[in-house]
Structures are given as C-alpha cells and as structure tokens.
C-alpha cells in the first residue's frame, strides 16, 4: 500500500536575484563644514575616505577650492557590494556604509535586475562648481 502524495500549497518560491553586475550611483551633494568624503571603487568594494577639518580651524571655513589643504585624512570605511547584495537578498538587510562615519552614506538603495542603484552622500564645502552641486548619475561595472 502506498501513501498518497501530498500536494504542496505553499506557493512558489520567489525568483533568486541575479548576480550583481553594475552599480548605478550619484554623488548627492550636501553642504558641510564637518568634513568631506572621497569615494572610490576597487573591484567589488566601495571605499569612502573621510577627511576632517584641520585642528584649530573653525568648521565654517571649508571651501571647495581649498578642500584638500583645509582637511586631513581621518579614516576609510569599506563595503563589499557583492556581499551586501547577497545579505540584502538572504537576510533582507539593505546595504549600509556606516561604522566610524557620522551617518550612513548609502541613500535609498534599490535593486533593478542585476544593478544596485543608490545615492552617496557627498559632503562638500561652499562654492562647489555646478557639476558637483548638480551631479549626473554614473555607472560602475563590476569586474
């Protein structure tokens, strides 16, 4: 005697996400005298180098033209975007880049197919040029 087969009525499993292939990002300008960020991609990692005003200077003096001489390197935060993508898929935790940084710099992350799309908070000093104050979106293709 054989047992009747049970019908699965649990619903269909959601389709797995495709592998991360691209990052669509924009450096969202935000005026700040508390420091500045410099972003760079290396392989699957996004680095944020954070610079603070030099000691003994008032915070209200950072200007775009003198940003490199008015600030000094403080630390670097890093996130592996592929790991963050998988953690978002498997655990529902959206990508975040905040350890020592005063705020999470990844703003409103979204997924669109194989692309991770977000804005990056970009602190800048006063008198930044037009293309910095009104940036265009950029695409980074992962190796």
Image (cartoon, helix red, strand yellow):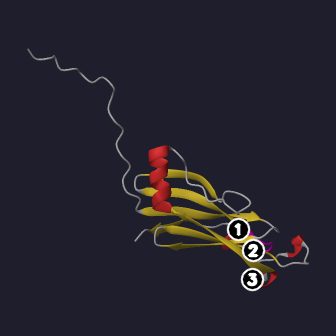
CB under 8 Å between discs 2 and 3: no
Q: Is residue 36 rendered magenta in the image?
A: no
Frontmost residue, 61 versus 49:
49
SS state under label 2: loop
Q: Given the current orientation, which residue lies at the most extreme front position?
A: 1
Q: Is residue 126 magenta?
A: yes
Q: Residues within 10 Å of mark 3 (few under 14, many from 20)?
A: some
Location of residue 50 with respect to 120 vertically, above or below: below
Spatial distance from mark 1 to mark 3, Cα to Cα?
Answer: 18 Å
Badge 2: few (under 14), some or many (20 or more) residues near its Cα, within 10 Å?
Answer: some
Q: Earlier in the sequence, mark 1 or mark 3?
A: 3
Disc 1 marks which residue? Answer: 133
The image shows residue 61 at horizontal and vertical percentages of: 87, 75
Q: Residue under circle 3?
A: 68
SS at circle 1: helix
Give the numbered dot on residue 128.
2
**Label drawn at residue 60:** none
Q: Which residues are magenta?
A: 124-129
Q: Nearer the viewer, residue 43 or 63?
A: 43
Question: Quadrant where the C terminus lies?
Answer: bottom left
Q: Position of residue 131 (x, y in %)?
A: 66, 72
State the quadrant of the N terminus.
top left
- Residue 92's place in the image compared with 12, above or below, is below
The furthest residue to the bottom: 69
* Secondary structure of residue under mark 3: helix
What residue is drawn where x is 40% and y is 56%? Answer: 114
């Amino acid at each position: 005697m054989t047992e009747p087969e049970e019908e699965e009525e649990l619903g269909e499993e959601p389709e797995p996400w495709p592998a991360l292939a691209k990052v669509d990002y924009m450096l969202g300008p935000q005026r700040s005298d508390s420091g500045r960020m410099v972003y760079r991609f290396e392989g699957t990692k996004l680095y944020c180098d954070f610079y603070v005003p030099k000691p003994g200077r008032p915070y209200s003096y950072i200007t775009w033209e003198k940003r490199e001489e008015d600030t000094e390197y403080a630390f670097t935060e890093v996130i592996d975007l592929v790991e963050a993508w998988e953690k978002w898929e498997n655990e529902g935790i959206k990508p975040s880049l905040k350890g020592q940084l005063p705020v999470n710099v990844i703003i409103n992350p979204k997924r669109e197919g194989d692309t991770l799309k977000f804005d990056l908070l970009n602190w800048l000093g006063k008198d930044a040029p037009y293309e910095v104050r009104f940036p265009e979106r950029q695409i980074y293709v992962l190796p």
